[in-house]
Image (cartoon, coloured by chain):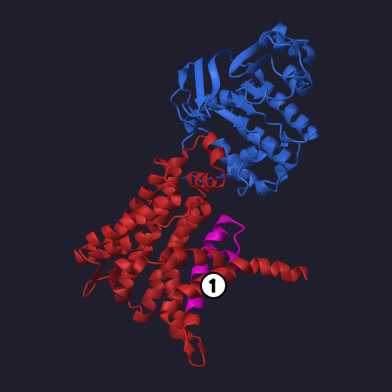
Amino acid sequence: MTLYAALGAVEQGLVYGIMVIGVYLTFRILDFPDLTVDGSLPLGASISAVAITSGVNPYLSLLLALAGGFVAGMVTALLNTKFKILHLLASILTMIALYSINIRIMSGPNIALLGVDTVFDSVIRLGVPSHLAGLIVFGLFALLVLLCTIWFLSTEIGQAILATGDNPQMIRSLGVNTHTIIILGVGLSNGLVALSGALVAQNQGAADVGMGIGTIVAGLASVIIGETVFGCTTMARAFIAALLGSIVYRLAIALALGLEFGDFRFNPSDLNLITAILVIGALIAPNLKKRLIQR
Amino acid sequence: MISLTDIIKYFHKGSVNEVFALNSINLEISEGDFVSVIGSNGAGKSTLLNCIAGVFFPDSGSIRIGGTDVTGWPEYKRARLISRVFQDPLLGTCPSATIEQNMALARLRGKKRGLGRGVKKSDRDYFREQLQKLGLGLEDRLLDKVGLLSGGQRQALTMLMATMIRPEVLLLDEHIAALDPKTANQILNLTQEIVSSIKVTTLMITHNMKHAISFGNRLIMLHQGRILLDLRGKEKEGLTVKDLLTQFYQAQGEELAMDSLLLS
């Protein structure tokens, strides 16, 4: 793997790390497996891209993307809490609906960001070399999201979110409306996923309706790799592990794609197979370790 | 304090599994009453408590607590007035949160939760002081996860969390049934201490007739969704398990049968 490829992988790990923090919030904290993210990632991308091309400030467009993702998450959570639709099914319904909505937003399956200002341009104008702009912007955003999430979850409301995932019966009997908490939590999660999608779109110069495919798989893979490699004893540590897990995941993918066995090489289309093998590896590693120690 | 009027509750109404759980319950409980509730399985004890707590709504009838009609209030809203301790010690606390985090959650029972810190520094001394009352050494383990505690310790913590901020009503749903006899006695004594020190109106479900007789100032026996016996004050003093069984069969109009073995 070249330094250039490694740098690219870290960049991707950071920007998709924002998505992974969102996935951790639903999947682990709220115990709510949420597939909406496959739709809310391109939702964020398309909202941001359309906003920028219509002259909105690129930073403001990120906020709009965040809000759009929040609403998408709220819809899933409302379907689940108020209408008693199974969480997985509710999130799949929102996800497929978002496919059509995203095409509506962009008036087509994709939209290019040519000749318009993005958050990266504003950083480059400050004198940052262009090949480092991505790393710096993604790094700062990932750090900001990480710190905000950890702060929020240690507030009174945040503690109620943690308790809702842990013991809903108990927290209801302490006067917390668990429906409201789930709507807030799933909303926030998808807001972060949309923010991540918006940053990706601004970086690669285009939003595409297909860019969300496999988001949840990548998210879960990163979460599980992070937990296995970095541990999750406290809430703050678990979120840091999720972000680092995302970087390790992207590095592992880059490494695998660069492997050569004689004439054999991996194609980008082998990505899903590699992801599956990585997740399986991360899932059985703790077990394997235990067995080896017993012997 | 608590007043239940014509409470009727069916489960699975209209299906083959229909259960007539509460059959027009009328009950007046005064401020500061400690009521023990007994009855065989399926008598409607838990249904009664859950109706008061708002876990589900009665099909008809009204529930008033301290003069407020709470019949339409959802469970989380009634938490302003009601504290609960469950039979399963795992239900009352969050296993992956620390002792102080759990206590901080309970400190805000029924209050608005905002963006202030979940556990404040100023709370810690108060929590320690409260935990000392339990005499379990938990005051030195504020940062331990509750999942590490034994069932008895968790139930003691739950009792404390339920009463730390004085509720109007305390509901104990067989809260010692899942504990070993020694721990059960400790929790029961703790219950007695706390209830008499904060003088809270309490309903306690128990399967143990001796406990039902020796604790509280009033005893209610439920049978098939009805209140079969309601003994208080002098009627309850000096009662024995045998008296209770005799009264039960008199009220029920059935003969003393082999059942006495099951109920003793």
Q: Residue at the location (48% across, 44% down)?
A: A157
A241 is within the stretch colored magenta:
yes
Would residue A69 be found to the left or right of residue A51 on screen? Answer: right
A104 is within the stretch colored magenta:
no
Q: Residue at the location (67% across, 29% down)?
A: B174
- Quarter of the picture containing the N terminus of chain B is top right
- Quarter of the picture containing the C terminus of chain B is top right
**A258 over A184 or under it: above or below:** below
Q: Which chain is red?
A: A
What color is chain B drawn in?
Answer: blue
**A137 over A179 or under it: above or below:** below
Residue B253 in percent (x, y) is at 68, 9
Give the quadrant of residue B36. Answer: top right
Tag 1 subunit: A
Taken as a whole, is the magenta stretch helix, strand or loop?
Answer: helix
What kind of residue is marked 1?
Leu
Badge 1: residue crowd in 10 Å (few <14, some 14–19, many ≥20): some
- Residue of label 1: A278
Q: Residue at the location (28% across, 63% down)?
A: A46
Looking at the rendered structure, the secondary structure element under dot 1 is helix
Would residue B151 be found to the left or right of residue A137 on screen? Answer: right
Residue B208 in percent (x, y) is at 74, 24
Would residue A95 be found to the left or right of residue B121 on screen? Answer: left
